[in-house]
Image (cartoon, grey):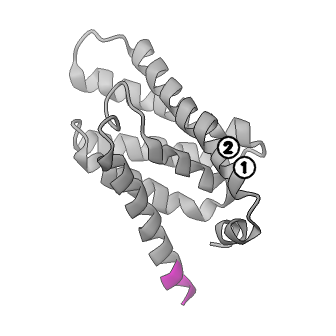
Amino acid sequence: MKNTKFLVQTAVIAGIYAVLTIAFPFSYGPIQFRFPEALTLLAYYNPAFIPGLTLGCGLANIASPFGIIDVIFGSLATFLSLFAMTKVKNIYLASIMPAIFNGVIISLVIVKITGTSVNGLLIGAQIFLSEIIIVSIIGIPLFRSLQKNSVIMEKIRNL
């Protein structure tokens, strides 16, 4: 029963992440605001969210203009950032992990795929900034407000 519950919850998180990413027009490319990235803070509270968020990223990246490369490397960047978040004890420091991993990995992918002389540092900085805005500036206050509800936090911590 516990495995079934975990699989269902993983699928729900993956679906929410993927649908919200695909629904917003600025979810892909060098200048992106991927609002579901705020959900990555779930991994800070409970590592059991890592599979669903990583899968959700992979599913969302199927719709990416960069195709299978984005599915692979975007999911890798998400997984690495989520794993790193679980190792950090400070939510503010944890919130910059997606900015670091996505800023570096995704900018390298975009530069490699486009084959143009685009400035990789500029692309990395744009992705870094968008992740900081979504995860740190929007996500942390959202999760701080959720922390006031013991029932919700109990569910998050005991997935």
Compared to residue 72, the image places residue 93 above or below, namely above
Q: Quadrant for the N terminus, please.
A: bottom right
Question: Is residue 40 visible to us here?
Answer: yes
Please, is residue 11 above or below residue 130 in the view? below
Q: Which mark is residue 144?
A: 1
> With 42 as the anchor, is 91 left or right in this view?
right
Amino acid type indicated by mark 1? Arg
Q: Determine crowd level at label 1: few under 14, some 14-19, many 20+ residues with C-alpha closer than 10 A.
A: few
The answer to the question of whether label 1 and label 2 lie on touching residues, with beta carbons closer than 8 A, is yes
Q: Quadrant of the C terminus?
A: bottom right
Q: Position of residue 103 (x, y in %)?
A: 48, 27
Could you say whether the residue bearing mark 2 is in a helix, strand or loop?
helix
Categorize mark 2 by other alpha carbons within 10 Å: few (<14), some (14-19), many (20+).
Answer: few
Magenta residues span: 1-5
User: Going by the image, does 143 lie left or right of 77?
Assistant: right
Question: Residue furthest toward the bottom?
Answer: 1
**Type of amino acid at the residue the image marks with label 2:** Pro
Tell me where residue 83 appears, x and y as whole percent.
Answer: 60, 49
